[in-house]
Amino acid sequence: MQINLPSLDGTENITAVCMRPDRYTRLYEALTCDTPVIARGGGLSYCNAGAGRGCRTVVSTCFDRILAFDAEKRLLTVEPGMRLGDLFEFAVRHGLYFPVLPGHPSITVGGCAGFNVHGKTQHNVGHFIDYVERFTLFHPDHGEITCSRTDHESLFRLTIGGFGLTGYITNITLRLIPLKGRSVLFQKRFVANLKEAVEVMKQLSEKVDVLYSWNNLNKTGDAFGEGIVFSEQFIDEETSARDKPFHLFTPDMRSVLRFNFYYRPSAHMECAVYYNMERLTGVEKRCALKATAFPIHGKEIYYLLFGKQGLREYQMLIPHDEWAGALDDLRALMNRMKMPLTLGSMKFFTGAQDLLNYRGDGICLVLDVPANRNSVEYFNKLDEIVIAHKGVVNLSKDSRLTAGTVATMFPEYERFKNELNEFDPKKRFNSALRMRIDV
Amino acid sequence: MSDKKTAVVIGASSGVGRAMARELAYRGYRLVLVARDRAELDILAGDLRIRAKVEAVVSPLDLAAATTSGIQEFVARCAADHPAIERVAITAGQVSDDDQGPTPLPLLESIVKTNYLAVIELVAGFARHMEQHAGGTIAVCSSIAAATPRGRNTVYSSAKAGLETYCRGLQHHYRDTPVRIQAFALGYVDTAMSFGQKLLFPAASAEDTARYMADKMSTDFRVGFYPRFWRPIVMVLAHLPWGVYKRMKF
């Protein structure tokens, strides 16, 4: 069946054959065919990693069952279509926690594996791969392969963060950690600019469990990046908040509004309203862990207001020693090209960059703009800044990066490409992302 | 066998049935999971044991292939193994793209068997068992198609209409007993049946549908639509003059 499969940012719409098998016999039939296939989870990646022209998309969301649970070893084996909200609730019920939680509970475990995602607090807990014990990968030419850090180690590293291009993960075993508390102490610190935000975050990074910022990048001069540093600490006390179920979010829901509401004045106003609302609501509160676990959940209206034309998100990771220089260049670009910046946010990262993973030691800055004719040019300029300051861009957030830019940014681009093509020379797994970045 | 309250879910391996099994498990029911695919049922049973810490047993049954005596034996076996059956949810069904106009005979038989004949045999069997014990609720899935027949899914819609009529008859028969028979006329639900289709209205999730049905199974609900916005739509469609109705493309 031909279905329109949009990326979450709404800039890549692909009509392709799409199947959603609900049992293993149909899954293996769907994966074994002459045309290239690609798995799709919740469809919440900003680029179209789960669809491609001439490819068959196999949606994994019916495979959402728990296959095994070892409470003593804290190991949970699940199917790839399990949504993070479901994983979160199961873990918390058992006094456990999965620390790498990206923005929305509708994201699937398989999607997290494909992009080796990070959560709100990468500098404390690492990436998704750090909590993967093993997984079983199905590839029509290789059959089922169980991969771990000891068995098929290179395929293990190629698959987690391999954009679903090595095969279909049929099950994955995750390592949970003990839950420190069922509530969090949520604190805000208001900062005058981006520089101060980084200073405050440096002071807090060792002391809190979760740390990120919101910054108004529309401000100029000394107020550039005025904003709020958010921190969270687990506390072991019950809150009286009502336990509402998580709701679903899909790319189709995101594009339900016809028109974009974000222009320069409205982006300024949106940021000012948000900042002042946060000022009015106090600097400290205790809330249920569930209420803060997924920052986008409940705030989907922000994405809807970009309308059908969609948004573009840029997520860059700049090494600490390059940050000051990069900040000057960013400020100059933002002064020169007056784009409506609807979101600015920072996190700290640690770890070594490898393959096409979005990881390394440094500062992660996220920004959103409406997808219009200037946004691609704007992002191309951002690419130049990132390359000049030895940074990398998150491929899961970007639907326009070219092969040349990716090859320049990522030192192990060729290694990734060679290993992938050695494992899957016939390109049985393919997607718009693979075609675009030419791996 | 444990005397813990038991729920039987027929059609448990996918869609609304799977969601129903999960919902009833979270509500503490001991589960008997029924579908034709044993391997899938085993995985689901394992999932429910881990998630909800309930007992879950599997009992493979292919409604399209089952004979009347086979269904009677199945009900008898279920009743013997699990006397405390309090809930039965029959979500199994069959639709086919080839069910158009005068549907070919083998397909016609299969659709009638899966959506009507086997289902009413199951309802009758479990209702008799419940009448002799402490009562209980039997829920079946009908469809909005039952009230708005059209050129596509002709056999399916007539089978569902027959099923609804049968349920209304049994409701009257069991009016003074603790046996409740319920028919849920489902609109678009996000299952394999509707996946990828261009729909006039949004599809409800299987999870929300199961939650609604499970809630209603504790009440005196008899026949109704889910999602509920379908009620006025079906009412209007059902009362359109033929001259207008025949021009409808849906």
Image (spheres, rainbow, N blue to C red):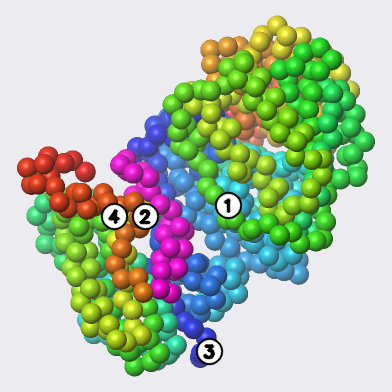
Amino acid on which disc 2 is placed: Pro
Tag in front: 3 or 4: 4
Question: Mark 2 or 3 closer to N-term?
Answer: 3
Q: Which residues are magenta?
A: B194-219
Q: Nearer the viewer, mark 3 or mark 1?
A: 1
Mark 3 lies on residue: B2
Q: Provide the secondary structure element on which disc 4 rests.
A: helix
Q: Nearer the viewer, mark 1 or mark 4?
A: 4
Instruction: Tell which residue pokes out farthest to the front in this image.
Output: A280
Q: Are marks 3 and 4 in contact (CB under 8 Å)?
A: no
Q: Image point 91% across, 45% down: which residue?
A: A207
- In the displayed structure, does residue A348 sit left or right of residue B193? right
* Label 2 vs label 3, nearer the camera: 2
- Circle 2 packing at 10 Å, graded few (<14), some (14-19), many (20+), is many
Residue type at the position of mark 3: Ser
Residue A246 is marked as 1
